[in-house]
Amino acid sequence: MRAISQRALGLAWVVPALVLVGVFVYLPLVQNFGFSTLKWDIYSGEQEFVGLENYRKLLDDPVFWSSLLNNAMYAVISIVFQVFGALLLAALIESIRGDRWRRALRAVYFIPSAISLTVAGLLFYFIYEPNLGLLNHALAAVGLGEYAQAWLGQESTAMPAVIAMSQWQGFGYSTLLFAVAIQRIPSEIYGAAALDGTGPVRRFFQVTLPLVREMTGLMTMVTISGAFQVFNEVMVMTSGGPDNSTQVLGTWLYRSGFVRNNFGYAAAVATVIFVITLGIAMAQLWVTRRRRVEW
């Protein structure tokens, strides 16, 4: 009886959380899939069941594919800078002997991460401004004025410019997380490596890199997942332009639903985003579980 009462008490604590998760997470997911089977004019309230027609249109939509490609490019560049670049920078910072310098550098690199994406987007919007922007003036000042251009006004440079802003904003946060992971490595291991005559480069590859692989895997998955949920920076800086060249899945979802008044199609895009992020989360859980078994 006592075991049953303890189990009932445990369920009593868990049930409210399950209800909240079900109502605010799983129910909207099911509803969203239902909405994706409709042709829905939200302003007039007219709804028409079209089955999987929205998904067929999605596969034939060149803007959807270019948006998906932009998200993929965003993910690849973010992995290079916010995972491997941040790990290298964290290793360099933690190799500095002076504790005061290490703390100062951590703070300097973390400051951009404390700025909201909206504010950072507006800041870089003015930096990229072709006539009064800081970037073009800086290029002219060092004799590279021929490279000055409308960075956000050209299809070839708009998306790289947006991604560059995002890397600047998130780089410090990733560096700080890797710095914490490196600090958790016992100093005796580095001492033993130094006694063996291992140089700093070999210590990085033979000691630091293997011992922070769990954080590296976690940051890789989080970075990829975040890259497919990008929204704020694109909306603030370009709103998907010029000529839809900077559309990502999030902004195309917004434009389809609130500008083109096609909420069924927008729900289909949302379903694709969910499937992608769910796949990334499942991969993360599988990799984490496998590593724990290996250890």
Image (spheres, grey):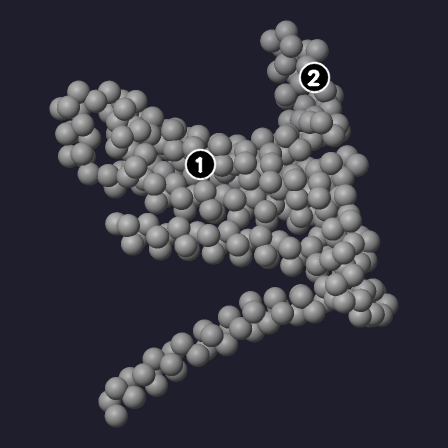
Q: Which residue is mark 2?
A: 148
Q: How many C-alpha atoms fall within 10 Å of the one at disc 1: few (<14), some, or many (≥20)?
A: many
Give the image quarter of residue 140: top right
Instruction: Of the two numbered discs 1 and 2 on the same chain, state the one appearing first in sequence.
Output: 1
Q: Position of residue 88 (x, y in %)?
A: 38, 29
Q: Position of residue 101 (x, y in %)?
A: 31, 26
Q: Is residue 237 above or below residue 270?
A: above
Quarter of the image containing the N terminus? Answer: bottom left
Q: Residue at x 49, y 32 (%)?
A: 80
Q: Residue at x 15, y 34 (%)?
A: 188
For residue 25, the mark is none
Disc 1 secondary structure class: helix
Give the residue type at disc 2: Ala
Mark 1 vs mark 2: in front: 1
Q: Is residue 267 above or below residue 109?
A: below
Disc 2 secondary structure class: loop
C-alpha span from label 1 to label 2: 30 Å
Q: How many C-alpha atoms fall within 10 Å of the one at disc 2: few (<14), some, or many (≥20)?
A: some
Q: Which residue is mark 1?
A: 83
